[in-house]
Image: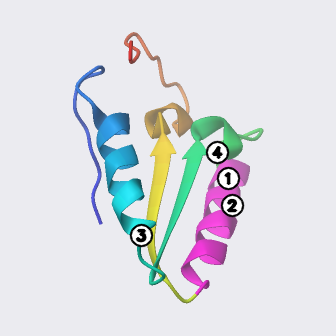
Amino acid sequence: SSIFLVPPGVGKTTLVIAMALEVNKSAEWHFQSFDHSDFEAEGRNVTGINIKNKLEAIINNGKKNLVFIDEAHLLLDHSEDKHYDTA
C-alpha cells in the first residue's frame, strides 16, 4: 500500500499512470482509477460506505490491485482545497 501526500504539481498522477501502464502488462494485476467525486455522498457515513463497497468489489476480483483515488483529501468533511494540480 502507498499513499502519496505531497504538494500539488509534483507528479503524483503521472507516477500512478506510469505504474498503471506497467501493471496492465500483467494478467495478475488490475488497475482501477477513481476521482474523489465517484464516492461523494451526503454525509461522511454514506461516503465511507461507498468507498468500502467499491474497494471490496476490487479486492474480491482475485487479482493484485492498484487503486488510484485522485484528490482523495476532498473526501474529508470541511476540506478546503486551496491548492490544485496544474498539470
**Could you say where residue 87 lies in the image, as x and y percent from the top left?**
38, 17
Magenta stretch, residue numbers: 46-61
Three-letter amino acid code at the position of disc 2: Ile
Q: Is residue 76 above or below residue 56?
A: above
Residue 28 tag number: none
Q: Is residue 26 above or below residue 76?
A: below
Of the image marks 2 and 3, the number of the one nearer the N terminus: 3
Residue assigned mark 2: 49
Three-letter amino acid code at the position of disc 3: Lys
**Could you say where residue 39 lies in the image, as x and y percent from the top left?**
67, 46
Tell me the distance, in whole angstroms, between the alpha carbons under discs 2 and 3.
Answer: 31 Å
Q: Nearer the viewer, residue 19 or 65?
A: 19
Three-letter amino acid code at the position of disc 4: Arg
Q: Quadrant of residue 73?
A: top left
**Label 4's element?**
helix
Contact check, label 2 and label 1, Cβ < 8 Å: yes
* Mark in front: 1 vs 3: 3
Q: Is residue 87 above or below residue 48?
A: above
Tell me the distance, in whole angstroms, between the alpha carbons under discs 4 and 1.
Answer: 4 Å
Residue assigned mark 1: 45
Contact check, label 2 and label 4, Cβ < 8 Å: no
Residue assigned mark 3: 25
* Mark in front: 2 vs 3: 3
**Could you say where residue 65 lies in the image, as x and y percent from the top left?**
45, 72
**Could you say where residue 51 lies in the image, as x and y percent from the top left?**
62, 58
